[in-house]
Image: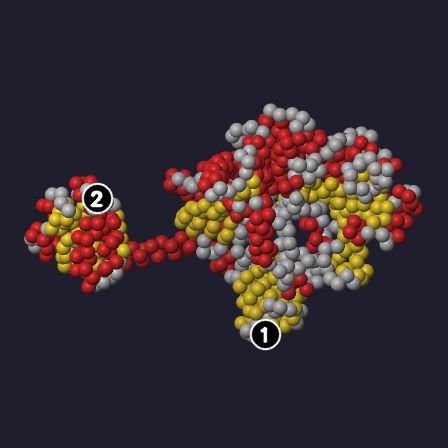
Amino acid sequence: MQKYGVNELRKMFLEYFESKGHLIMKSFSLVPHNDKSLLLINSGMAPLKPYFTGQEIPPKKRVTTCQKCIRTGDIENVGKTARHGTFFEMLGNFSFGDYFKKESIRWTWEFLTDVVGLEPDRLYPSVYLDDDEAWEIWNKDIGIAPERIFRFGKEDNFWEHGSGPCGPCSEVYYDRGPKYGCGSPDCTVGCECDRYMEIWNNVFTQFDNDGNNNYTELEQKNIDTGMGLERLACVVQGVDSMFDIDTIKALRDHVCRITKTEYGQDDETDVSLRVITDHIRSVTFMISDGIMPSNEGRGYVLRRLLRRACRHGRLLGVEGEFLVELARTVIEGSRDGYPELEEKKDFIFKVIAKEEEQFNKTIDQGLSILAEMEAEMEKNGEKTLSGDHAFKLYDTYGFPLDLTKEILEEKGLSVDEEGFRASMEVQRRTAREAREVTNYMGADATVYESIAPEVTSEFVGYDNLSFESSVTVLTTETEITDALSDGDRGTVFVEKTPLYATSGGQEADKGYIRTADGEFRVEDVVKLLGGKIGHVGYVTKGMIKTGDTVTLEVDEENRALSARNHSATHLLHKALRTVLGTHVEQAGSSVNAERLRFDFTHFSALTKEELKQVEEIVNAQIMAALPVKVENLPIEEARKTGAAALFGEKYGDIVRVVSMGDFSVEFCGGTHVENTGVITAFKIISETGVAAGVRRIEALTSKGLLDYYDELEKRLAEAAKLVKASPEKLAEKITHLLAENKTLHSEVESLKSKLAQDAMGDVMDQVTEVKGVKLLATEVEGVDMNGLRDLGDQLKDKLGEGVIVIASAAGGKVNLMATATKGAIEKGAHAGNLIKAIAGLVGGGGGGRPNMAQAGGKNPDGISSAIAKAGEVLEEQLS
């Protein structure tokens, strides 16, 4: 048997099923589309669910894919065995109401034996217990002896997911030989050991489960198959595990070189080598699909994988960053099947480098926190770290439990693992309870799902602002209806529409749908599964019925202003790449008639100079009045133009390319101006950070910018009026007022000080002596805290050594101040403690330093008592 490489096997599989009439579809993104039941794509069929459920019509009834997948359910076991991994590729062939069991089984056998060359006598099929049809095909058509066909129960050979389509499975096992076995004489297919490896699963979707285990035959029967590419490669290449197949071994060897270790010499070292090898594959592919590190959802999975890889690098003695180098090897090994890795490599490297750098700082902080926890345990005589503390280290600093355990075990300490799991379960339960109610697809259940899949809409708005079409479906907010009348809210579906639906960051058109006697105000336009376009709004007069011929009209001004802002985002995107570098990628946008918002990948705030440069470049292209050209091109031809593609977007075979002179070329389905001069001008209003490695610019053009300047002009005029100046003399007037205010403030403070002195009069005759320390405790009327402090300084000069306490009532409140000289402090006086002891008598509190303290209160009647008590407190301090 020839030992084909991973990239060869992928190509062989897809081309084989293409020869059987299947359409080869590129791998979907790891980010599920319209499916809230999944965090990440975890199987070959997951992104094809709309075709299986009939909510979308597939591009062809026979499809084949190699789908990138991530599963993290047992992430803690990754590395501990050679079986577990988070990233894998799933080969699959699918039939949507076309062929069924006979063809599926025959092609499975033909591909494995004739194309790949596996020995037939090492292959063992299994079928569902009651699936006599599949058993007959394997036995009669393929020629497998009865004793080599295994019947298993529902748990092993029946696929279902609650209610909905389901059916029996037929799996194919490969005998890897006795060296992988358990040694038991009863060892056979189904044994838990590694000898018999399941490599292919054929799911025959032929029933519908009503949710109560009542099964009915489906009118349209489907085929859903899956074969792990890495498992197939293990068998074909005759190696022990996925970590030994060609592309992954090359990566593992690179990890060994960086860590200066050798695989297979030490169990603990091997665990770390496998973790790093697996996790960097997942990380690289996730980032290529636009997933960014964060503390929730997909971003948290990415961050956790990155940090586990970093931590295991440290365990192997790696200092500093090393994951970017490994990502290069991932890309080299997989770019044949996934060209997007090569296209996005600079961005992938930036994200990994930034996150790794941050974690290296975080892990040191975490170790410091753990050291504090250890010190607290020692102080309390404890030997076990609490589950809450262990979970805090895990959740806040990315410390897996095993790292915390390992560090503590070195010091003879342990972790409350049960408590840790309880804290983890609280978090999981909170997350579960926060999930939205979803249907089988995982999307929010809505009235739109009741619409027949053959209902579709065509957008004709690039060349038309008004168009006549027929109403195909009407809905209220809860059900399909035949008519909507005056005041009713709902959604209108037509065959062809000139109104643009929200997509690509551009907000929907607004407009009207009119009949001879009815009018519907369109507030929003939405894209739905199956190519449907819904016009959401309400009837302003008359009635609209299914089947009516209607005229759809776009709000022209709203469209024109949105187009100007949208075209400006293209100029902005190119300007940012020019000023900041080619790592800049569009990470999202929001465009409407009023303003534009543009999110992009960059790792620091823009300087004033950079923002000015970006603004100048955009305005220069507007002034140049560049012609805007739109072409529909085959995607490969479009890529050759150098057109920028939206990050993480899935494109069809034909793409729309928007060019603005020779300056900007992008894939884009939105609406645009015919000439950049129409945009008028461009102004950046704000630049902020919105996520790790993502910045946001908000800007205005055209009417939005004029409205902005109008508002600024009004505010300027109002401000000028308040200070009795003309707008052009406002700055001069404010400068004069500030200088005048400063002078007046100085005069006021001087007067206040004089008034305070006058109010106090000669108080030196009130000085008493407490155990050899002079004390002046007195009251003055209407002086604020600043005035009291000034008085305190003046009186201290007169008093020499001693303690001064002054109280004053002002505006119904009390201010208290105490000061003590160095000599008094040396004898035991403490201004802060003194104030604290007497402040309660005036209904307040306060404190301060030994030499100076102050307090506030709400009871002026208590001032005399506070003054009297000052001597008692000082006497206690001096005793």
The residue positioned 75% from the left and 55% from the top of the image is 160
> Counting residues from the N terminus, which is met first, the one under dot 1 or under dot 2?
1
Q: Give me the residue at 55% from left, 66% from top.
A: 537
> Does residue 734 sit above or below 232 in this rendering?
below
Q: Position of residue 444 (x, y in %)?
A: 62, 60
The percent coordinates of residue 229 (x first, y second) are 73, 38
Indicate whether 261 appears above or below 571: above
Looking at the image, which residue is at 53% across and 59% down? Answer: 509
Under tag 2, what secondary structure? loop
Image spot of residue 52 (x, y percent): 73, 54
Q: Residues under labels 1 and 2: Cα distance?
A: 89 Å
Assign the N terminus to one quadrant of the image.
top right
Colouring mode (rainbow / by chain / secondary structure / one colour): secondary structure
| Residue lying farthest to the front in this orientation | 879
Q: Secondary structure at mark 1?
A: strand
Q: Amino acid at mark 2?
A: Gly
Q: Nearer the viewer, residue 656 or 45?
A: 45
Q: Amino acid at mark 1?
A: Ser
x, y percent for residue 497: 61, 60
Quarter-wise, where is residue 256 in the image? top right
Vertical side of 67 occupied by 837: above or below: below
Left or right? Give the position of 177 relative to 696.
right
- The disc label shown at residue 828, or none: 2
Q: Which residue is mark 1?
A: 485
Frontmost of labels 1 and 2 is 2
Name the residue rendered at 17%, 57% in the picture.
868
Q: Is residue 835 visible?
A: yes
Q: Nearer the viewer, residue 589 or 745?
A: 745
Q: Is residue 306 left or right of residue 266?
A: left
Q: Which mark is residue 88?
A: none
